[in-house]
Amino acid sequence: MPLKTLVKAGNITNLSDARYFAGMGVDLLGFSVVEGTPHYMEPKLYQEIRGWVTGPSMVAEIYGLRRKEDLERILEDYKPDYVELSPAELKLFETLPLSFILRVDPGDVPTQASLQPSYLLQRHDTAVASPYPSLLSIETKEDLERALHDPIMKGIALNGSAEIRPGLKDFDALAAILEELDAD
């Protein structure tokens, strides 16, 4: 299903979310890949999920990374298309081997950076203008309506959630947002 704008789905922890988002035409799927962080996904499960979905680019969410050397292992184990990080993790690097998404708070928005993000990830209700394309983080259909009228928006960002039990999930809230974005 083609969508009206670019969509990133993050914090994915299960196959149900990954397959649902891929089937709905989401562009980017994000997975927490730093051991010991919330929503951490082991490499084996990530690779199994990756084998089940086609279409979206994969994003390694590296929030909480403490040593730049750990990124090499992550890239080898997960083979992502992008990394997603905050200014705290970005400070570890002089260069990054992949395109990246930088999650920022209003006071953190770079005007110029030595490392150029592909996208900034900002909350829809506190987003500020930047020279970089912005993905606006939303949670509801009402948030979407406001985000779609924001001139800085390049796309939106959603989050996955836990399954009720394996294979059982309520997608109603996400469906309302994604159906609103259906370009057909």
Image (cartoon, rainbow, N blue to C red):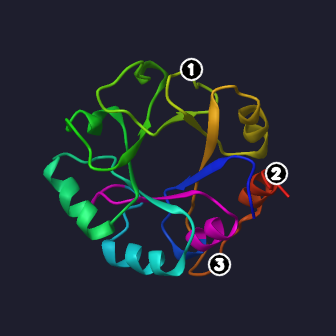
Q: Does the rendering let one see residue 163?
A: no
Which quarter of the image is occupied by the C terminus?
Answer: bottom right
Secondary structure of residue under mark 1: loop
Residues at circles 2 and 3 in contact by the CB criterion of under 8 Å:
no
Looking at the picture, how far across and down is residue 162, in whole percent?
Answer: 55, 66
Q: Determine whether 115 is above or below 1 in the image.
A: above
Q: Disc 2 and disc 3: Cα gap in Å?
A: 23 Å
Task: Look at the numbered disc 2 and give the secondary structure of its residue.
Answer: helix
- Residue extent of the magenta highlight: 17-37
- In the rendered view of the protein, which quadrant contains the N terminus? bottom right
Mark 2 neighbour density, 10 Å: few (under 14) some (14–19) many (20 or more): some
Q: What residue appears at the point 76 percent right and 52 percent down from the top-left corner?
A: 177
Q: Earlier in the sequence, mark 1 or mark 3?
A: 1
The residue pinned by badge 1 equals 129
Picture quadrant of residue 161: bottom right
Q: Amino acid at mark 2?
A: Glu
- In magenta stretch: residue 68: no
- Measured in 3D between alpha carbons, the distance from the residue under mark 2 to the one under mark 1, in whole angstroms, is 25 Å
Residue type for callout 3: Leu
The crowding category of the residue bearing disc 1, from other C-alpha atoms within 10 Å (few below 14, some 14 to 19, many at least 20), is: some
> How many numbered marks, from 0 up?
3
